[in-house]
Every structure is written in C-alpha cells, then in structure tokens.
Image: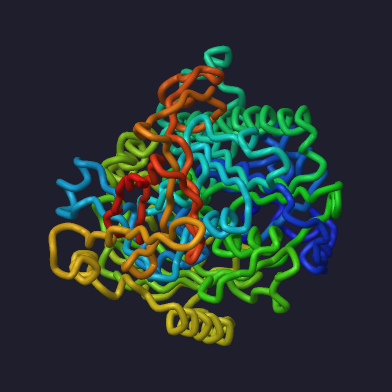
C-alpha cells in the first residue's frame, strides 16, 4: 500500500536529483553575512516542498532563488534536544542534552522529581557562534534559545527581542538568527491573537487531508487547518525579514537559511523520530543568486549546521564536532550515508528510541519495549484534538494504524521503507525480504552508538550526580584572575572549558541596561502581543576574551568579567583598575 501524504517523496514529482552542485563548490567570499530564519515544529508543509494546500509565497521565492534540500533531518523530534544539537554540532544523546527538557519549570520539577539543570557539556564543547565571534563576526539571536543549558555571555553579542544584524559595526560580518514562533504546537491549541485581522482560518479545513495514523474528524481537520494557517502567517513574518534585508541592500550578498527546529506538530508527529517528527523543510539561499533553483537530495542532519556555518565563514571547524560541513571550503569529501536521531524523556515520561535512516529506509531501536509508543503528556492532553483521539481510543473507534499508538508494548526493532511508506505504517522488520537491510542498518546504529556513546544508558539522576560530584547544585566556575602585563591586563580562569567574557566600564560606572526597539516574531511577540518598534531593555554586550589577549585599560576604568563553563555556575566580578 502506498501513502502519499507528502507527495514530493514519490518518484517522478521532482526532476531527478543526482548531484548537488552547491555542496561540491568552494565559496570564494570571505566572511559572508549569514542569516538564519528558523520556525517551530513543522514538517515540510511548504508550497515549495510540494505541499500546495498552504500558500507560502515568500518561502517559495527563497527556494527559487536558493537551494532546496529535500533530505534534511533533525537529531530529535522536539525543541530542546534538537536545538542543543544545532547550537553545539554534537549529538544530544552523546553529551547529555537528550532529555526534554533539562531547564524544567517548577511544575515539571514537581512531577519528575528532578531539579532544573543545565547540561554539563564536555570541556571542549561550545555553542558555535562563539567561534564566529572569535573570528570577528557580530552574532545575534532573536530570541528563543532552549539549548538545554544557560549559554555563556560569550555566545551572542545580542540575544533578545531587539537583537538584530543592524547593530553590527560598520563593515563587520554578522551571523543573525531570527526564530519565528507562530507555528509552535501551543499555537495549534490556542491561536495567537496577534493576527486579529485573520480571525478566520486561512486554510479551509475541508481541503486538508489528515494522515492515516490520525482519526479523520472535523476537529482534527480544524486543528490541522489552524496549524497550516500558522504556516502561512509564519511565511508572512519571513517575508517581512527578507524585505528588510532587501531594503538594507543585504539580501543579494548574504547566505540565508530557512528551516524548522524539528517536525510536527499534530499528535503523534512532534517528539517522534519518524519522518513526521524529524524531517524538516530546509532552504539555503547563496550570495549572488548562486545555485538558484537547485534541488539537493543529499542526506543532511541538523548536527551538520554548526560545522557548515563555520565552513562558510572560513573558521576552522574544531576537531570534536560530530556533524560534518556540507557547504563551503571545509565541506566533507564523503557524503552522509545515514542520519541519526534519538527520543528520550519527554516532560514527565521516559522512553528511549534510536533511529537511523538512509535514503530509503528507517530503522528504529526501542530500548523500552514494555511501554506504549504513546506518552500520556499532561501538556499535550490540553490539545482538544488529543482529547478526542483519547476518547475514540476508549470507545474502540480507532482503526488499526491509529490504535498502534496505544498498544501496551512495542517491538524491539522497527524497519520502514520510507519512500514507499512515508507515513511509516508498515513495520517490515520481520519480513525476510528486508533481512539484509535490517542487518545493515542495525550495524550502522551500533557503529554510531559506539562512536559517539549514549548518555541515556545512565539514569538521568545518576548523570546529574556525576556531573555535580554528588552535590545538590552544579559546580562553580573558578573566579577569573586579572594579571597586569606589559601594555595592559590579561585574564586567566582555572576552570578548563570556561568561556570568559568582559566589558569595560568607565570610572564609577555600574552595569546597566540600554533600550532598543523590538524587531521580533518570536515568543514575546506571539505570547505577549509586544509590537515591533516598542523599546525593550537589554544588556550591553560582552566581549569574548581570547586566551593570552592583552586588554588595554586606563587607571580608573573598571573591568567586568564573567566566566562560565557550560553547565557550571558562572563566576562574575568587577575589577577596579588602579
Ligand atoms: Ca520547536
């Protein structure tokens, strides 16, 4: 049986995709500007990706003027672990950022019995924008982080609802991220009032087709139509940012990435390491219209984004990064044969699933076979459609595909032919015709787990105990020391892996905030109805301290210093210069 929920996955719809020119060329431009426009929680529900129930003219235009990547996957099907992989270039399962989420709310702490914590990353691991800053880039993030750790002050020049490329110094290259929040799962439950001019759904529920693993009901269609309406509103937001870049004369010479932080966001889609949870829309527009209109079907992973940006920026990719660059002068010589992903605790429920996918098949390994695939998450139960699915399950009204979610146990292994069965309805792990493929993918997963490790082998509380040396709170970063040298001052920090930032204050000056106009379509804009142009208070930026660097300071000036190893408590101090 063939299902064509995503029609672009079927052969013959798109021209043959054999080679990806873009990935094979080196880029001459030195320190280009790089802009990321990211959205939340969506599979490729985008016109340019063959999903024509929605109207996404701005993204479609970007895809026409750039390269469309049809095989991009995230390392997790949910925000925090996925975003941790993106910002570090490390698999979440490898460094302890795999549980959703670590910075738990007070309510979640009560339900899990866990404290809110920042993952303690290996000493060498950094949030990659810090490498760009060391190379002279201005970096800004507007504004969601959700990295599974509180980032050091050295990662972003600006991280707020006002963070914007326009604050870079004259001629300074920039890496600027804009997160568009409107397509988040929460907005499928209760739509933002931000678009009061569109009280009606922008997508006709009668036109949408629910996937076969979800019950076909009026409420289901309305929920999907609302999700798709939000995709259209997101496209409008993206269009506003593109227009600003054009008005500022930056569009033509910049790299512009568009992608979702993972897939979803209907029930049984978000949080899964299936196509519907980790396959994302992904577009890269190159400077000067290079490669316009090309389509690349190479397998790419979100863990590759950090090394790819470093490669484009001409910054040497650190050895420890687990992703591989697919663009720029340091692009990997060998293309990926597989992409990998994991699913672990979601809110108050544990699971442990690992996924490997090649260009046609997905293999899943379930470590917790004694539990259903369904997780009874309190948060998701607030979605009316989820309630309806639970009611239909109770009444025995779900079909066999839909009921699969609620079976009390799950098989140890699953295998899907995702090209011919994109909804992953038919587990062929026991089919002798696919025994060779099963053996191959099993081996690929074993190889990956051996190579990068799997922190989920350790219970979460034990992982914390080891990180925190048995204490109830994280270790503290050592207080930096200021040393007078010829020509100025140098800083040292005894904690290995600490990032050190500093600000120079004038005599008598105290740390303070400044006002900047909001330029955002992120959480505060969607949740709090904060209009753009309104002034928000933000911190003044920190400089990144490079080891061995001498800072020139005058008597009377003050040096404010902040040091932090990721996962440790920061150390902050103001030195008065005599
Ligand atoms: Ca998300």
Is residue 398 visible in the rendered image? The answer is: yes
Which quadrant is home to the N terminus?
bottom right
Q: Quadrant of residue 84?
A: bottom left
Q: Position of residue 289 (x, y in %)?
A: 86, 47
Q: What residue do we see at 39% from left, 58% from top?
A: 404
Q: How many marks?
A: 0
Left or right for 496, reference 25: left
Nearest to the observer: residue 490 or residue 132? 490
Image quadrant where residue 231 sits: top right
Give the vertical position of 54 relative to 87 (above or below): above
Name which residue lies at 81% across and 66% down. 26
The answer to which of 139 and 420 lies nearer the viewer is 139
Q: Is the residue 468 above or below the residue 284 in the image? A: below
**Residue lying at 72% horizontally and 58% vertically, measured from the top left:** 10
Q: Position of residue 311 (x, y in %)?
A: 68, 64
Q: Nearer the viewer, residue 337 or 433?
A: 337
Residue found at x 76% / y 41% = 62
Question: Looking at the image, is 466 positioned above or below residue 314?
Answer: below
């Amino acid at each position: 049986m063939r299902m064509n929920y995503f029609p672009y996955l079927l052969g013959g719809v798109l021209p043959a995709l054999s080679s990806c020119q873009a990935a094979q060329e080196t880029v001459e431009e030195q320190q280009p500007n790089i802009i990321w426009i990211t959205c939340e929680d969506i599979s490729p529900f985008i016109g340019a990706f063959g999903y024509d129930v929605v109207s996404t003219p701005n993204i479609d235009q970007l895809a026409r003027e750039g390269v469309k990547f049809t095989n991009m996957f995230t390392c997790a099907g949910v925000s925090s672990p996925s975003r941790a992989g993106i910002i570090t270039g490390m698999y979440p399962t490898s460094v302890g950022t795999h549980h959703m989420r670590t910075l738990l709310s007070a309510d979640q702490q009560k339900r899990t019995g866990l404290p809110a914590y920042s993952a303690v990353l290996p000493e060498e691991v950094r949030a990659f924008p810090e490498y760009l800053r060391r190379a002279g880039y201005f970096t800004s993030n507007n504004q969601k982080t959700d990295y599974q750790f509180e980032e050091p002050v050295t990662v972003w020049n600006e991280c707020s609802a006002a963070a914007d490329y326009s604050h870079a110094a004259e001629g300074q290259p920039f890496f600027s991220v804009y997160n568009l929040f409107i397509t988040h799962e929460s907005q499928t439950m209760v739509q933002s009032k931000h678009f009061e001019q569109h009280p009606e759904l922008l997508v006709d529920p009668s036109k949408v087709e629910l996937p076969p693993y979800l019950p076909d009901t009026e409420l289901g269609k309305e929920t999907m139509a609302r999700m798709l309406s939000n995709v259209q509103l997101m496209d409008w937001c993206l269009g506003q940012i593109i227009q600003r870049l054009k008005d500022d004369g930056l569009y033509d010479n910049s790299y512009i990435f568009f992608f979702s932080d993972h897939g979803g966001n209907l029930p049984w889609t978000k949080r899964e390491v299936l196509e519907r949870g980790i396959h994302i829309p992904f577009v890269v527009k190159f400077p000067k219209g290079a490669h316009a209109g090309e389509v690349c079907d190479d397998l790419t992973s979100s863990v590759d984004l950090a090394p790819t940006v470093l490669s484009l920026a001409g910054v040497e990719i650190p050895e420890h990064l687990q992703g591989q660059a697919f663009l720029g002068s340091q692009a990997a010589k060998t293309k990926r044969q597989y992409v990998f992903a994991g699913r672990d605790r979601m809110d108050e429920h544990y699971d442990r699933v690992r996924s490997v996918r090649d260009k046609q098949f997905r293999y899943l390994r379930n470590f917790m076979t004694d539990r259903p695939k369904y997780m009874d998450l309190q948060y998701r139960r607030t979605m009316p459609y989820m309630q309806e699915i639970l009611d239909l399950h109770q009444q025995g009204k779900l079909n066999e595909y839909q009921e699969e979610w609620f079976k009390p146990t799950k098989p140890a292994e699953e295998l899907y032919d995702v090209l011919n069965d994109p909804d992953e309805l038919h587990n062929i792990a026991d089919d002798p015709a696919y025994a060779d493929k099963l053996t191959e993918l099993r081996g690929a997963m074993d190889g990956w787990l051996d190579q990068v490790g799997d922190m989920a082998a350790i219970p979460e509380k034990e992982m914390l105990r080891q990180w925190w040396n048995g204490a109830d709170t994280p270790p503290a970063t050592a207080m930096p020391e200021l040393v007078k040298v010829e020509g100025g001052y140098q800083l040292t920090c005894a904690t290995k892996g600490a990032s050190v930032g500093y600000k120079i204050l004038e005599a008598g000056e105290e740390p303070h905030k400044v006002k900047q106009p909001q330029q955002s379509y992120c959480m505060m804009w969607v949740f709090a109805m904060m209009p753009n142009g309104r002034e928000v208070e933000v911190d003044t930026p920190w400089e990144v301290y490079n080891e061995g660097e001498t800072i020139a300071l005058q008597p009377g000036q003050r040096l404010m210093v902040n040091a932090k190893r990721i996962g440790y408590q920061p150390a902050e101090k103001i030195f008065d210069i005599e």
